[in-house]
Image: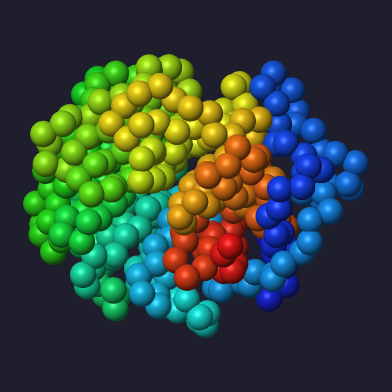
Amino acid sequence: MRLLSLFALTVVVFACTNEEDHPPYLGDSDSSPPPSPGGGNGGNPIGDASVGDAGAALASASNPEGIFVAGASLYYTNYATGAGDGSVSVVSTSGGTPTDLATGLSGPRAVVVAGANVYFTLAPTAGTGGLSTVATTGGTVTSIQSNVTGAYGLATDGANVYWTLNAGNNGGGAYVEQIAVGGTTAKQILDFGGDVSPTSLALSGQDLYVPTDGTQAAVFWGTTNGATNLTPLDTQQSITYADVAVGAAVVYATIDDVAPAGQIVSFPLHGGVATTVATGLDHPQRLALDGANLYFTDPDEGEVWVKDTTTSDAPVVFASGLNAPLPIAVADAVYVGDADAIVKIPKL
């Protein structure tokens, strides 16, 4: 993997316009390689769009998998190799030297902050993981749950923390677990059996959304009080839903597949037929919604894209020149976890 010096990292941010010479999307739906970005524009993904403000490397990182903004602090996981060399770190949203809150971790992935606690999931490349916590000031790591798989998704409403599990030896399927902030006892609140594995988790009010992959995959919906168990929003199929983001009336999901090609789709909040938002994309991954602007990362192409959800216009490249960008969050700016840095980019 190409590594970039923190101080040499350059991010090009493109202004989004609706000019007709923007190419439609990367990739295609017939499993053939995607065309070169930008057609005959020498690889410029959005033709002759003007160049806006450049992003900046905020802190060093090592294959970050999760980021979370809390006030003026940004917390992130360094997945590293996924085998005992990971850590959880925090840095000011203004930049500076990051502080390691926990080290020697095996596959730290998602991260959230609730009260004085940082919660993070462990999903190593081999073996089992779970959920752990450490104080926002660092110190002793407390294991809340261990010896489980599928601890990929994590969310909090401030009072409780929720995370996903793979049912594994129990016949396959997805679970959602819950623990009160500051508590020590976890409990299962939602489940769904079958050939599905959770890939992420999103929370909106009492609604929980779990994207999955597998031969019976779907985006599942359930409620935090368990009154509605996990239910597929649409027909189950063999596909990979990589992430979800919840809007006022719909939930958006990325489809990270070669065939069909990468897409973004939306569903009614409590179930219904999927609507295509964007298609022909090259491995879209993580999502972040800021008003009408839906941002998503493309690790393969080293880009961040943005889609105006109020129009039928194609998404356009928001930032390029990155090194495998994956996690993304929007607060006062757009924050992206690159392979070796956390990058801060002015948002639209």
Quarter assignment of residue 159: bottom left
Name which residue lies at 11% across and 34% down. Answer: 227
> 294 or 329, which lies in front?
294
Question: Up-down: is 20 above or below 48?
Answer: above
Query: Where is residue 41 drawn, in percent x and y?
Result: 88, 46
Colour mode?
rainbow
**Which residue appears at 53% of the width and 28% of the height?**
276
Rendered location of residue 174, percent (x, y): 27, 30
Residue 112 can be seen, yes or no: yes
- Front one among 81 and 176: 176
Does 275 sit above or below residue 151? above
Residue name at image x 77 percent, y 47 percent: 19
Residue 342 located left or right of residue 162? right
Residue 260 at x, y = what percent? 59, 22
Q: Quadrant of residue 156?
A: bottom left
The percent position of residue 307, horizontal first and vertical second, equals 58, 46
> As drawn, is 214 to the left or to the right of 325?
left
Count of numbered badges drawn on the protein: 0
Q: Nearer the viewer, residue 137 or 274?
A: 274
Indicate the quadrant containing the C terminus: top left, top right, bottom left or bottom right: bottom right
- Residue drawn at the location 18% of the way across and 38% of the way down: 223
Specify whether residue 283 is in view. Answer: no
